Image (cartoon, rainbow, N blue to C red):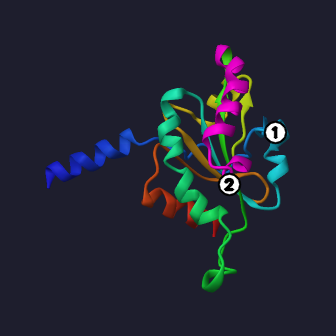
């Protein structure tokens, strides 16, 4: 029993707490599609719930990518037949963030995405180039090498946040925040 209590305490202190960001408006961010179309977050997403996945290091890329397929099937793909009409009407964006000296790599990353990413996913990938300080402070980015996910309500306020690779339990929490 004592071992179980110790494990629970360790998990509680090792998992990032996003309590301080819940209820805040997502900070303004201007990003671009692979076609260089500008998207202003959260302004261009107001009126719908929005799921944002942000990553600002190469090491976080695999964990960010682990969300692509499950998010696509859950929130993006338009269902047909028996399931028609049961889909979600949400904005979804994955946002690799290029900051500091890495900002120069944005164009290369866009070209790479055009070649390697499923064309169905491309409209849901935005590229941010600029400073990171504001987002680290406002969004409580504790660790550089993991992706961060935020669910915004229809007004751009953060209603749920998590980090790391995909898991079914995290997806359940995202889905609950959107419903």
Quarter of the image for the N terminus: give it: bottom left
Alpha carbons under labels 1 and 2: distance apart: 14 Å
x and y percentages locating residue 160 in the rendered image: 59, 54
What residue is shown with label 2? 120
Q: Which mark is residue 35?
A: 1
Q: Which residue occupies the foreground of this view, 30 or 78? A: 78
Vertical relation: 175 (above or below) 54: below
Give the magenta range: 101-124
Q: Is residue 124 visible?
A: yes
Q: Secondary structure at mark 1?
A: loop
Q: Specify the farthest residue to the bottom.
A: 82
At 49% from the left edge and 64% from the top edge, which residue is drawn? 172
x and y percentages locating residue 154 in the rendered image: 77, 60
> Magenta stretch containing residue 97, yes or no?
no
Q: Left or right: where does residue 8 sit relative to residue 55?
A: left
Label whose residue precedes the other's in the sequence (1 or 2): 1
Quadrant position of residue 141: top right
For the residues bearing labels 1 and 2, Cβ distance under 8 angstroms: no
Q: Assess disc 2: are there few (<14), some (14-19) or many (≥20) residues with their C-alpha within 10 Å of its C-alpha.
A: few
Quadrant position of residue 101: top right
x and y percentages locating residue 62 in the rendered image: 48, 38
At 15% from the left edge and 50% from the top edge, which residue is drawn? 2
Q: Left or right: where does residue 171 sit relative to residue 129?
A: left
x and y percentages locating residue 7 in the rendered image: 24, 47
> Magenta stretch containing residue 120, yes or no?
yes
Q: Main secondary structure of the magenta part?
A: helix
């Amino acid at each position: 029993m004592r071992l179980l209590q110790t494990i629970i305490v360790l998990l509680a202190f090792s998992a990032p707490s996003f309590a301080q960001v819940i209820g805040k408006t997502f900070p303004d961010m201007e990003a671009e599609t692979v076609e260089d179309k500008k998207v202003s977050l959260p302004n261009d997403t107001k009126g719908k719930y929005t799921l944002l996945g942000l990553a600002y290091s190469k090491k976080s890329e695999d964990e960010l990518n682990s969300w692509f397929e499950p998010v696509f099937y859950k929130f993006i793909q338009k269902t047909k037949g028996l399931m028609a009409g049961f889909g979600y009407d949400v904005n979804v964006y994955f946002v690799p963030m290029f900051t500091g000296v890495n900002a120069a790599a944005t164009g290369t990353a866009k070209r790479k995405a055009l070649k390697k990413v499923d064309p169905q996913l491309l409209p849901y990938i935005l590229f941010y180039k600029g400073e990171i300080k504001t987002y680290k402070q406002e969004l409580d980015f504790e660790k550089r090498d993991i992706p961060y996910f935020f669910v915004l309500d229809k007004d751009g306020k953060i209603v749920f946040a998590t980090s790391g690779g995909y898991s079914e339990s995290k997806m359940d929490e995202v889905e609950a925040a959107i419903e």
